[in-house]
Image (cartoon, grey):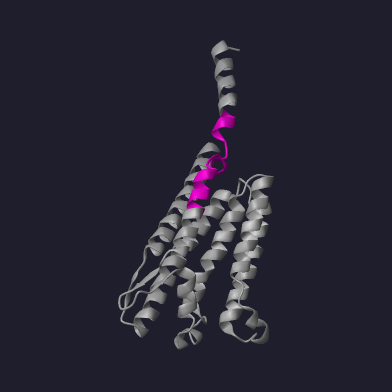
């Protein structure tokens, strides 16, 4: 066999493993930074009232919108609060998928449990099980556990890009829809308000997460061609 053919074959075999390195796992700091940015955006004001020194973050705005009588009669009930509160569920799903390694997974499990506990309704829920607002909070807390904890085990390097891209797209859509509904509810009861910085940070974080996941999918597809 020609020496050049042998050398070319060896170079190809040595380069192939490098081409198939899992890109999502090679950038854990980027994913963690985006998750921290997402959490920061959820805590920052989503609504700035014009007539009063009132600022509401995503969860406060969800609680405020749940008090509107029309929200209980909407289909589905409490649609605006649902779209605002579901971000913590998406965050738990992303935290579970992003964790790689035993120590990281243990830390992620604690974060997921803490976020789920933070979503639990007040203790009055025990004596008011028919309360739609409390039931929604309880259901989302369970959803956070049922998505986040299994993601720690089942979302591996192969499925991580699709999971991150899907959560990023879902989060962006719920951000736009939830903010629009909640601002409309506020405008119907008050003199109006404007979107706060938190909305744009959350939207930008989801766009970036979608980009990271989608790019990893493209790189993986090309490496297998």
Which residue is found at the position 48% from the left and 75% from the top? Answer: 62
Name the quadrant containing residue 2: top right
Q: Could you tell me if residue 225 is visible in this image?
A: no
| Image quadrant in which the N terminus is located | top right
Near-viewer residue (200 or 40): 40
Q: Could you tell me if residue 101 is visible in this image?
A: yes
Which residue is found at the position 50% from the left and 54% from the top? Answer: 36
Say whether residue 112 is left or right of residue 32. Answer: right
Tell how many labels.
0
The overriding secondary structure of the stretch rendered in magenta is: helix
Say whether residue 223 is left or right of residue 117. Answer: left
Where does residue 130 sit, x and y in percent of width and height?
62, 87
In the displayed structure, would residue 143 be above or below residue 13? below
Name the quadrant containing residue 10: top right
Which residue is found at the position 58% from the left and 60% from the top? Answer: 92
Say whether residue 30 is left or right of residue 123. Answer: left
Near-viewer residue (146 or 225): 146
Where does residue 112 sit, x and y in percent of width and height?
62, 60
Membership of 19 in magenta stretch: yes
Which residue is found at the position 50% from the left and 39% from the top? Answer: 222
Say whether residue 201 is left or right of residue 108. Answer: left
Membership of 138 in magenta stretch: no
| Span of residues in magenta | 16-35
Where does residue 148 sit, x and y in percent of width and height?
63, 59
Near-viewer residue (210 or 179): 179
Where does residue 173 sit, x and y in percent of width and height?
44, 65
In this view, the residue farthest toward the front is 53
């Amino acid at each position: 066999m020609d020496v050049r053919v042998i050398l070319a074959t060896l170079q190809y075999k040595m380069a192939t493993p490098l081409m198939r390195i899992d890109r999502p796992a090679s950038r854990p700091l980027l994913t963690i930074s985006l998750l921290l940015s997402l959490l920061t955006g959820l805590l920052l004001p989503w609504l700035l009232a014009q007539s009063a020194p009132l600022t509401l973050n995503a969860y406060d705005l969800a609680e405020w919108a749940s008090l509107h009588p029309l929200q209980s009669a909407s289909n589905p009930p409490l649609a605006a609060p649902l779209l605002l509160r579901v971000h913590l569920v998406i965050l738990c799903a992303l935290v579970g998928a992003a964790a790689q390694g035993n120590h990281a997974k243990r830390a992620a499990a604690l974060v997921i449990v803490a976020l789920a506990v933070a979503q639990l309704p007040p203790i009055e829920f025990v004596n008011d099980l028919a309360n739609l607002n409390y039931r929604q909070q309880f259901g989302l807390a369970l959803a956070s556990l049922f998505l986040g904890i299994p993601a720690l085990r089942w979302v591996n390097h192969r499925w991580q890009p699709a999971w991150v891209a899907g959560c990023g797209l879902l989060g962006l859509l719920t951000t736009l829809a939830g903010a629009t509904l909640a601002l409309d509810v506020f405008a119907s009861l008050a003199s109006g308000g404007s979107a706060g910085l938190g909305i744009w940070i959350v939207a930008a974080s989801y766009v970036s997460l979608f980009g990271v996941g989608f790019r990893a999918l493209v790189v993986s597809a090309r490496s297998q061609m």
